[in-house]
Amino acid sequence: MLARDEDILKAAEDWRKAGRGVALATVVETWGSAPRPVGSNLVIDDHGNFLGSVSGGCVEGAVVTEAIDVIESGRPKTLEFGVADEAAWKVGLSCGGTIRVFVEKVE
Amino acid sequence: MRLDILKALNEERAARRAAIVVTNQDSGAQRLVTAKDVAADPLKSVLEKHLRTAKSGIEETPEGKVFLTVHVPSPKLVITGAVHISQALAPMGQLLGYDVTIVDPRTAFASVERFPDVKVIAEWPDVALPPIGIDRYTAFVALTHDPKIDDPGLTLALKSDCFYIGALGSRKTHARRVVRLKEERGFSDNEIGRIHSPIGLDIGAISPAEIAVAIMGEITARLRQAEPA
C-alpha cells in the first residue's frame, strides 16, 4: 500500500519513541522535471529501514546512506542530486531534473 | 526535527488541522506554526500564502532563508446519492486524492456491487454525516434529486465551513430547493448562495462521466483558487 505523508511522519514519531535512531529527509527544492514535489518526506532508521520517497526510487539509496551518517553525527545535511552532478549519474536520477534534500535527525 | 515538534505536528494532522513547520536554513532553528497561530506569527503574510496554496517551499524572510513544510489535511468528498453519476464521480475523486464517502439510505442503490472500492453508507444523511465530519477541507455534493435525502445533507453542509457545496438539478428544481431551504430550514439567500447549482463547470457535459468531470473541475477550482480568508 502507498504510504501517505501522515503515515510517514507518524512512523518517524513512533520509531523514535521506540528508541530507534531516526532521520527525516525532506525535498526542499526541485528544478526541472522532478518526480516528487517539494515537501515530500522519507523517514530512515539507523538500520537503514525507510518509508516514503523523495524521488521515484532513483536516489533513495544514497539518501539512506547519508541519513545513517546524520543519525550518528546529529548534524543536518543538505544533499543535491542532478544530472550535472557526478554522484547523480551513479545513483541515476534519470528524469533529468535536480533535487535538493534536507536530512535531519529526529531528536 | 525535535521529537516534541514532530509529536505536535502529528497531533494537528490527526485532528485534520493545517500546520506549517518553519526551518531556518542557516541556523537550523525550527518551529511549528498551527493554522490558528498563523495570524499572530511574524511571518504571517508568507505563511498565509503557503497555507492557501498548500505548497511547501523556500522563502527569503527577515528571519533569513526559511524552508516551509506545509501540511494540510487530505480533502474529503462527501456525496449524497449512490446514483449513476456517483459511479463515475467517486473513482475520479479518489484519483484526485480525495477520501470519498457516499451516503444513500436506499440500500438497492448503496450496494457494494455498484461501488466496489468506495465507502458507501446506507443511512440517512442526518445519521451518517455528523461522524464523517464536514470541515473546511470537504467538498459536499448532493446528487439524488430527492429532497428527503439531499435537503438534510445540504443543511449540514451549509452549517459547516466546507469549501464546496454543489447540488444536481435544473434551474427549476433548484428554485424549488431554495424555497424549501428558506422556509423549512431558515437559511438566508446569502447562505444558500454557497450552493453551486446547476452543478459543475459549463462544458456541455451529457454522460454521467462527463458530468463528473464538470463537477470535479469545479471542485478543483474552488480548492486551488480559494480566495484569501
Image: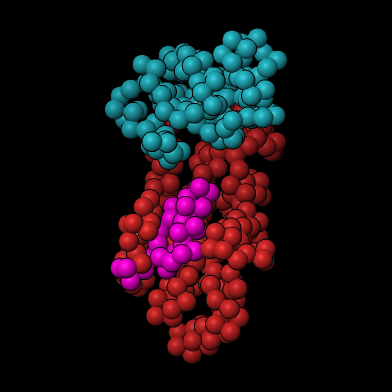
Chain colours: A cyan, B red
The image quarter in which residue A43 lies: top left
Q: Position of residue B39 (x, y in %)?
A: 59, 54
Q: Nearer the viewer, residue B185 or A76?
A: B185
The answer to whether residue B96 is magenta is yes
Q: Horizontal placement of B111 versus A43: left or right?
A: left
Q: Nearer the viewer, residue A66 or B30?
A: A66
The answer to whether residue B111 is magenta is no
Tell me: residue B55, above or below residue B145: above
Could one spot residue B48 in this view of the protein?
A: no
Question: What residue appears at the point 65 percent right and 49 percent down from the top-left corner?
Answer: B49
The image quarter in which residue B130 lies: bottom left
Q: Position of residue B158 (x, y in %)?
A: 49, 73
Q: Nearer the viewer, residue B218 or B191?
A: B218
Question: What residue appears at the point 65 percent right and 35 percent down from the top-left corner?
Answer: B58
Question: What residue appears at the point 39 percent right and 17 percent down from the top-left corner?
Answer: A48
Image: magenta residue range:
B79-108
Question: What residue appears at the point 67 percent right and 66 percent down from the top-left corner?
Answer: B204
The image quarter in which residue A80 lies: top right
Q: Horizontal placement of A67 versus B221: left or right?
A: left
Q: Quadrant of the C terminus of chain A?
A: top left
